[in-house]
Amino acid sequence: MQNPPVFIEKQYLGRDYSRISVRMVMALFCFAAYFITERREENASLFLVVGCGILIVSVIMMFLLHYKTTVQNRSIVLDGLWTTKKVKIDLNSIVKIERTAYSSYLINNPVYNLHQKGTVRFYAGGKDAIKLTDRDGLVYVIGTQSAGELEESIKMQLKTEN
């Protein structure tokens, strides 16, 4: 029987504040170069087009879903963009849950199902992450913007009997 989801979080590709800041600085540079350029008829229109293009792409990326995290039926389901495979983590095999910072870096690249050095990473934005370790020693790092809720929903699912 399908139980309703205990936790649902949608992570969007373009809503990370550091990435938005970088794109806005680039667009402002293009607009400033457009107004400063002396020979407008030759070069300036290119700066205007690139600046407007950056703004349009930035707005589109704010509505582009990177992945969705769902905690339901003693499992975590991570469903990504169009062609990505759905990842299902069975909570029966999890031995350790901890809340950590995702990374010490200021700007992190969005990743989905990145296998690297014994860890599987999922990240779109935010500073926090939930680190899950299974019986085989494989570590799942799930970046989230509401780490407390995700951690509590996972612990609640582990306590319930199936």
Image: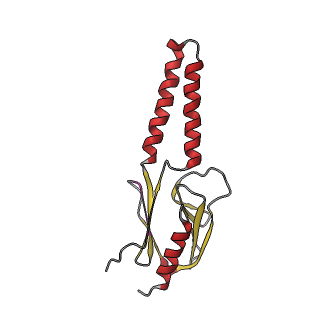
Residue 108 pos. (x, y %): 60, 52
Taking 29 as reference, is 152 above or below it?
A: below
Q: Position of residue 103 (x, y in %)?
A: 64, 59
Q: Residue at x 50, y 75 (%)?
A: 154
Single out the residue that lies furthest toward the bottom. 161
Which quadrant, please, contains the C terminus? bottom left
Is 135 magenta? The answer is no
Residue 80 counted in the magenta span: yes
Q: Position of residue 3 (x, y in %)?
A: 35, 77
**Magenta segment range?**
77-81
**Residue ID at (41%, 64%):** 86
Q: Nearer the viewer, residue 103 or 151?
A: 151
Location of the N terminus by quadrant is: bottom left
Furthest residue toward right: 104
The dominant secondary structure in magenta is: strand
Q: Residue at x 49, y 75 (%)?
A: 153
